[in-house]
Image (cartoon, rainbow, N blue to C red):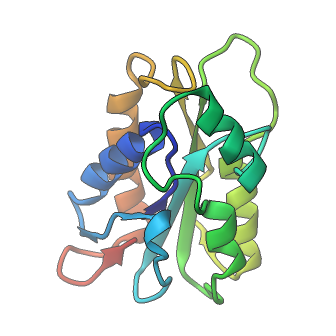
Amino acid sequence: MVYESMFGNSAKVAELIAAGLAERGEVTLTDVRESPAPGGFDLLVLGGPTHAFGMSRPATRADAARQGTIRPGAQSAGIREFLDGAPSLAGVAVTAFDTRMNTAFLPSGSAARKALRRLRGLGGRQIAEPESFRVTSAQGPLAPGEADRARRWGATLAGFGVPARDRGRAC
C-alpha cells in the first residue's frame, strides 16, 4: 500500500486499511515520500487526500502547508508523482482511496477516482471501486465511524486480490 498524507489523516486510513488486509496476507505500508519502487506484489492500494477535486500537485500541497502544520517532508511528493514514475502494472490487482472533507455538498472530484484511472492506464486490474473516507476538517480528525469503515474495507479487499497469507503480498 502506497499513500500520501499531509496532516496524517490519509496515513491513518492507510494504516487501518492495511490492518484489514493483514488478516489475509502480508502487507507493506509505504509513505510515497519514501519513493517506493512498484513491483513484487499481488495488490496495489494507492491513497491520498483530495486536493482541488483530484490528486495533489505541488501548488495544492503548498496551499495545504499554509493551512497548518503538515507532516515533515509531505510537500516533497504525492501519489501523482508516484504514478508518473510507475512502470507497467500489467495484471496487478489495483484500487485506490482518498480522504476528503465531510460536507453536505459532495463535489464530484476525487483523488481516488483519478488515481485508479491512472492505475488502470498502467495495466492494473481494478478489483474494487475507489473509496473516499471523510475527515472533519483538512487537519482532521477522521469523521465518526470512518476508522471502522476503513478497516472493514481493507478486510474486504483482502478477499479480492490477496492470496492466502503464505502466497501473497499487498503494497
Camera-nearest residue between 95 and 103:
103
Quadrant for the N terminus, please.
bottom left
- Name the residue located 72 percent from the left edge and 76 percent from the top edge: 84
* 113 on left or right of 151: right
Where is residue 138, by image quadrant? top right
Estimate the x, y position of residue 59 in percent, counting from the top left.
Answer: 77, 48
Asked if one can make out residue 145 in the rendered structure from this viewpoint, the answer is: yes
* 171 on left or right of 82: left
Q: 91 above or below 65? A: below
- Name the residue located 71 percent from the left edge and 80 percent from the top edge: 122
Q: Residue furthest top?
A: 104
Where is residue 103, by image quadrant? top right
* 95 on left or right of 17: right
Quadrant for the C terminus, please.
bottom left
Estimate the x, y position of residue 27 in percent, counting from the top left.
Answer: 28, 68
Estimate the x, y position of residue 166 in percent, counting from the top left.
Answer: 17, 81
Task: Count how many numbered circles sit on residues in the image.
Answer: 0
Q: 40 above or below 154? A: below
- Name the residue located 68 percent from the left edge and 44 percent from the top edge: 62
Camera-nearest residue between 161 and 104:
104
Estimate the x, y position of residue 39 in percent, counting from the top left.
Answer: 47, 87
Asked if one can make out residue 127 in the rendered structure from this viewpoint, the answer is: no
